Amino acid sequence: MASAVVSSRLMPAAGWQPGHVWSPDNVRLCWHDHLAPTVPDGRPALLCLPGLTRNASDFGHLGDRLGADWRIIAVDLRGRGESGWARDSLSYVSLTYLRDLSLLIEAAGVQRFVALGSSLGGLLALRLTTAHRAAMAGVILNDIGPTIEAEGLARLRANVGRSGNWPTWVHAARDLGARNAAVYPDWGLHDWLAFAKRLCRISAQGRIILDHDPRIAEPFRLPHGDAGADDWAAFDSLAGMPVLSIRAERSDVLSAATQSQMARRLPGLRCVTVPGVGHPPTLAEPAVAAALSAFLDGIA
């Protein structure tokens, strides 16, 4: 089943080119590739993995800031953005996402990469070590860690799958702003309009709707839906690799205590806290931009 996408948000005119590969269960998996001709030979790609209800457009701004020096691959997970919707809603789980990512990495010709993951994408970045540890040159975890706070998990489970259907972009922006006011308390209408255009699309009926399959909520809401995943073991396997942990000051998903435990278990972990925002930071905040640039400058 395919989503009714009107157009890509990461336009080729901005340096982005689309790519896709088909999964064994016939889902079209899409990514957006920003490859500048000045990227040094041998430099790893930056593989960007979005959060639960988000898509590749969350990383569009990185093309402007990093695209001259890095190949950036921004992924639409199945059921989001320009990737197809799965026939079986129970395929919206980490094991399937990881299999999809392995196909995508091979299809995109990626030999080495730095994994940058926001929220769910960060958990996938951790779990990629199972099959791709040797190809990973670094990991950036955006407001996620091996332990997720119960309050944040409950909020995410309550919100995922909620419908959204608005007549105009301004209506969508105002509603999304009301729903997420505690996450980005300093944003104005201009910010919420940009947010809405990353999170939503225009339907065939001309309405503004959320750009993901609402059925992604079904396995996520199941108790112990990710049983068997040991994310602390995956985190420990990052020893010897450059790792950056980004935490939102107002986060209800990644606590300061968990980030401190991560730093104790992984000597050399770089940590940054983004003031004034909740889960997750957009990665465009000044504190994050500086930390990302410094971190990536150290990647060989």
Image (tube, rainbow, N blue to C red):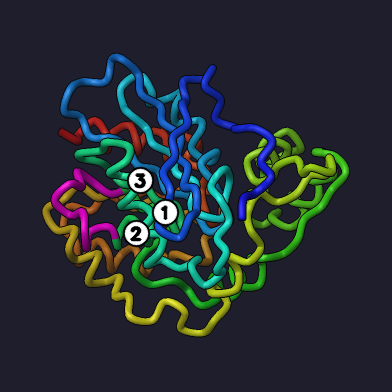
How far apart are labels 3 and 2 at the CA level? 9 Å
In the drawing, what numbered circle is on residue 23?
1
The reply to whether residue 287 is in sight is no
Could you say which quadrant of the image residue 145 lies in? bottom left
Decide which of 292, 228 is in the foreground and name it: 228
Mark toward the start of the polypeptide (1 vs 2): 1
**What amino acid type is highlighted by mark number 3?**
Leu
In the drawing, what numbered circle is on residue 116?
none
7 with respect to 169 (left or right) = left
Q: Residue furthest right?
A: 167
The residue drawn where x is 38% and y is 72% is: 147
Q: Position of residue 162 (x, y in %)?
A: 72, 64
Q: Position of residue 130 (x, y in %)?
A: 22, 63
291 with respect to 215 (left or right) = left
Could you say which quadrant of the image residue 213 lies in? bottom right
The residue drawn where x is 43% and y is 48% is: 22
Q: Quadrant of the N terminus?
A: bottom right
Q: Which residues are magenta?
A: 128-139
The residue where tag 2 is placed is 99
**What amino acid type is highlighted by mark number 2?**
Arg
The residue where tag 3 is placed is 104
Q: Nearer the viewer, mark 1 or mark 3?
A: 1
